[in-house]
Amino acid sequence: MTREKLKGDKYFKEYLAYEKERILKFENAIEQVISERGEDDAVKATYIAVQGFYFNTITALYSSGAPLEEIKAFFPKVINSMKKCWNSDGAYVEMLGMISIGITLGTPKEQMEELKALIVKDGLKDFLIDTLIHSFDNSWEVTTHEFSNPVPYQDLKVVLETNQSEVALDALKTYLDSKWYAGHDDMGWYDSHILQEDTYSGYWSFESAALVKIKKLNDSSLFENAYYPYDLAHFID
């Protein structure tokens, strides 16, 4: 049974098969090009495409109703794709999603360290990601209260700064109800559920589940929100 209501089991089965096929096709093409002429600009562009396919897959696995243990097992494959090409200019949302999923699923420390290394290499300074990382590594300093992507993430500022659970929960509910989806209208996946092409993998605010888990919020009022991945916030390994 799917976790979201816009598409059914048949759609996600076909979508996941298609993404798997694309990953295999593009990775084989990369190997061939590298063997013929090395890592040129075309290879680098293909790495970026493959990174997107992997993140689409982990999102679609969650949407499809896959067991959280299966998603946790797939997690390092997404990291490996990111290690080839990730940067915050083109894939901030993917990094935010991965760190958030990692926190909720309690993924192994070495995998989270690989994500941290990519952020250090990129030089990203971001209040939200800093706060998330600091939650599992208190040696990581929160060096800014600014957001590298203010829309929509600056609407989480109150959630990040307050120590009052009710205040944090009210702000998070507003974020999910009216800010999160609308704030991503510049993303390629926005409104993808109504396109003829099968490009929809799911709409999930993974960072919201991570913040609920970190701050130990009572998220019962968020259960019905279409963008809130409720069971991620309650995963116990």
Image (cartoon, rainbow, N blue to C red):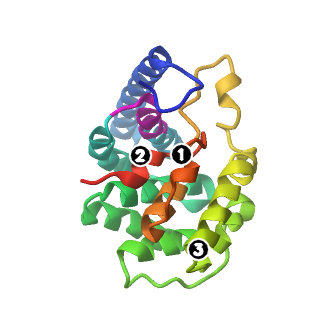
Tell me the distance, in whole angstroms, between the alpha carbons under discs 3 and 1.
Answer: 21 Å
* Residue 39 shows up from this direction: no
Residue visible at 55% across and 47% down in the picture: 228
Dot 3 falls on a residue whose secondary structure is helix
Tell me where residue 184 appears, x and y as whole percent. 71, 48
Residue, x 43% and y 37% (percent of image)? 62
| Position above or below: 235 against 54 | below
Query: How far apart in space, not on screen, are marks 3 and 2 (Cα)?
Result: 21 Å
Q: Earlier in the sequence, mark 2 or mark 1?
A: 1
Count neighbours of disc 1 (C-alpha within 10 A) and say few if under 14, some if 14 to 19, many if 20 or more: few
Q: Are marks 3 and 2 in contact (CB under 8 Å)?
A: no
Disc 1 secondary structure class: loop
Q: Residue flagged by tag 2: what amino acid is it? A: Asp
Closer-to-camera residue (35/121): 121
Which region of the structure is painted magenta?
56-66
Residue 70 visible in the picture: yes
191 inside magenta stretch: no
Q: Residue at x 59, y 39 (%)?
A: 203
* Image: 66 above or below 85: above
Q: CA distance from mark 2 to mark 1?
A: 9 Å
Disc tally is 3
What is the secondary structure assignment of the residue under circle 2? helix
Residue 201, image x, y percentages: 53, 32
- Circle 1 residue: 223
* Amino acid at pointer 1: Phe
Quadrant of the image occupied by residue 171: bottom right
The residue that label 2 is drawn on is 231
Q: Is residue 224 left or right of residue 71?
A: right
Q: Earlier in the sequence, mark 3 or mark 2?
A: 3
On the image, numbered disc 3 is attached to which residue? 160
